[in-house]
Image (cartoon, rainbow, N blue to C red):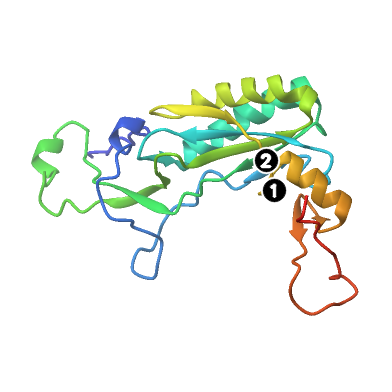
């Protein structure tokens, strides 16, 4: 009897480029294997927003596809380095790219006598094999927040995560406070004056407008 030999995973060069339209899991595209990456936040993810002011991002420099396997490998590498150097409670990693695009592969038989069985390029629409994230230039792939004294560890952890991805990435230190959208000076001012309220690992902005309530009665000193 002829057995088809199970092929290994194909290298990233096979699925790296965004050649096709987005092809997502749906009622038409069923039987899609689960994504390899299941955890997007790891580390001390419940740490209050005031504790971790420093944040660095791994930013893509190419328009490409990153497989779920690569995202998981990068998360593990980053996590392992930070646990060792900052302790379990010293950082919060967030994977910002989510793999929704389904990669298809046209499986060929690769055993003896396969040439008589295989159909070549006839019926070559492949079967769903794995998931990938579609990344654009300047898109953030991974963000890490921590204390300022661990900044160099965070940058080294992101450098190690880069080796798991094809293409070119840049590591960028942010001027923002943690995962918020406020610059550091603005954040400190807002916390002092009360129009920025901590809300888990992010913050709430209390606007000047709107109904005055128990939670919403802050005056913004914009004259400064």
Residue furthest to the right in view is 214
Q: Position of residue 70 (x, y in %)?
A: 48, 34
Name the quadrant containing residue 177. Answer: top right
**How many circles with numbers are drawn on the protein?**
2
| Visible residue check, residue 177 | no
Can residue 71 be seen at all in this image of the molecule?
Answer: yes
Is residue 150 positioned above or below 131 on the image?
above
| Residue that extends furthest to the bottom in the rendered view of this protein | 211
The N terminus sits in image quarter? top left
> Left of 84 or right of it: where is 131?
left
Given residues 48 and 127, the one toward you in this image is: 48
Mark 2 crowd level (few <14, some 14–19, many ≥20, 10 Å Cα): some
Check whether the beta carbons of the residues at disc 1 and disc 2 lie within 8 A of each other: yes
Label 1 neighbourhood size at 10 Å, few (<14), some (14-19), many (20+)?
Answer: some
Residue name at image x 27 percent, y 39 percent: 4
Q: Where does residue 35 sit, x and y in percent of width and height?
A: 50, 49
Q: Which residue matches tag 1?
A: 180
Residue 176 circle label? 2
Is disc 1 placed on a helix, strand or loop? loop
- Residue 25 location in percent, x, y? 41, 61
């Amino acid at each position: 009897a002829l057995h088809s030999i199970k092929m290994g995973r194909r290298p990233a060069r096979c699925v790296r480029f965004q050649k096709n339209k987005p092809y997502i899991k749906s009622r038409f595209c069923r039987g899609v294997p689960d994504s390899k990456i299941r955890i997007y936040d790891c580390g001390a993810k419940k740490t209050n927003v005031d504790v971790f002011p420093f944040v660095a991002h791994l930013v893509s420099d190419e328009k490409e596809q990153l497989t779920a396997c690569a995202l998981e490998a990068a998360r593990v590498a980053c996590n392992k380095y930070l646990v060792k150097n900052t302790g379990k409670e010293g950082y919060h990693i967030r994977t910002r790219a989510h793999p929704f695009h389904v990669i298809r592969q046209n499986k060929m038989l690769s055993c003896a006598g396969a040439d008589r069985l295989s159909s070549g390029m006839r019926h070559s629409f492949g079967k769903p094999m794995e998931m990938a994230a579609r990344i654009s230039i300047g898109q953030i792939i991974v963000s890490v927040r921590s204390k300022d004294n661990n900044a160099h560890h965070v940058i080294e952890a992101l450098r190690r995560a880069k080796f798991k991805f094809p293409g070119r990435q840049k590591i960028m230190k942010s001027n923002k406070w943690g995962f918020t959208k406020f610059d550091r000076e603005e954040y400190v001012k807002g916390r002092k004056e009360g129009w920025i309220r901590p809300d888990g690992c992010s913050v709430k902005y209390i606007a000047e407008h709107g109904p005055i309530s128990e939670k919403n009665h802050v005056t913004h000193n914009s004259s400064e």
